[in-house]
Image (cartoon, rainbow, N blue to C red):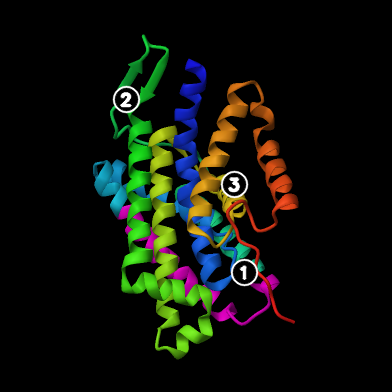
Amino acid sequence: MEQLLQQLINGLSLGSIYALIALGYTMVYGIINLINFAHGEIYMVGAYVGFALTTFLGLGFLPALISSMLICSLLGMLIEKVAYKPMRNSTRIAALITAISVSLFLQYTMMYFARPDTRTFPNIITNRKLSFLNGSIILDVKNIYIILITAVLMVALQYVVHKTKIGKAMRAVSIDKEAAELMGINVDQVISFTFAIGSALAGAAGVLVGVYYNTINPLMGATPGLKAFVAAVLGGIGIIPGAVFGGFFLGMTETMVSAYGGSVFKDAIAFAILILVLLVKPNGLLGKTTREKV
């Protein structure tokens, strides 16, 4: 039982990272039906921005986190304007190829400027560990930071989406872009804002991963980005609660599989679960079946 509780805590931390990245996927898809495969690389850029701010400028954890979110949000808007906006009326395969190209561009640009070497993230959060049940359960303070910051960001996102004017515009555009435009909503502005929010969350995830695992590299965004996409599809892509649920579900599953001797197969099991879920419920666990008139 103690081991189970310990792994649940670890799974919550990993699931928080996946959930933050998956939110960017699901928000962009919900607005313009684009799978932004460059999103994992924005998460990588966030980690490097946090590394640079803490290493060279000596900033603390929270200033580095906020600065990384702001820089990544600007990067997300720039990518949308330069790469995705011209492709909005193109075929889906063209937009998908563009997203993969942007992903590779960010990877190798970072590799050129920062070198392909693995960097050690500065220890900006205390390594204190809290023990419970006579030391059978150990809770790292970093786990608490990750879980609390993820919770705060998700509550803030829900507030923006449901209680603000721009959030109402986002929901209107996701339902019917043409009708929203006819009602006076600036669709371009809404799309840019969506990319900004999703990229900021990915930047926050990058800093949290750097703090937690202490190592970063230019290719670190590929696998977590793909798994976050799996999490978004698993919960129901285009649905914010679905992305959160999928992220935590995937994080818990991976942690449990690794803990009980299947660490080599954890990635295969994650994708196998996705296939099984899509066979039973193609719209994801929290997705709703939509009907189209023909």
Q: CA distance from mark 2 to mark 3?
A: 28 Å
Q: CA distance from mark 1 to mark 3?
A: 20 Å
Mark nearer the N terminus (1 vs 2):
1
Q: Which residues are magenta?
A: 67-95
Residue at 64% in and 27% down: 263
Residue density around tag 2, few if under 14, some if 14–19, many if 20 or more, within 10 Å:
few
| Label 1: element kind | helix
Q: Which residue is mark 1?
A: 98
* 3, above or below 30, in the image: above
Residue 35 in the magenta stretch? The answer is: no
- In the picture, measured across the screen, residue 167 lies left or right of residue 92, that is left
Q: Nearer the viewer, residue 116 or 189?
A: 189
Q: Which residue is mark 3?
A: 227
- In the picture, measured across the screen, residue 270 lies left or right of residue 18, that is right
Residue at 61% in and 61% down: 288
Q: CA distance from mark 1 to mark 2?
A: 42 Å
Q: Nearer the viewer, residue 293 or 45?
A: 293
Q: Is residue 137 visible?
A: yes
Q: Which residue is mark 2?
A: 127
- In the picture, measured across the screen, residue 16 lies left or right of residue 267, that is left
Q: Amino acid at mark 2?
A: Asn
Residue at 37% in and 23% down: 139
Locate residue 235, reporting x and y percent.
58, 51
Circle nearer the viewer, 1 or 2? 2
Circle nearer the viewer, 2 or 3? 3
* 199, above or below 182, in the image: above
Q: How many marks?
A: 3
Q: Amino acid at mark 3?
A: Lys
Q: Is residue 51 visible?
A: no
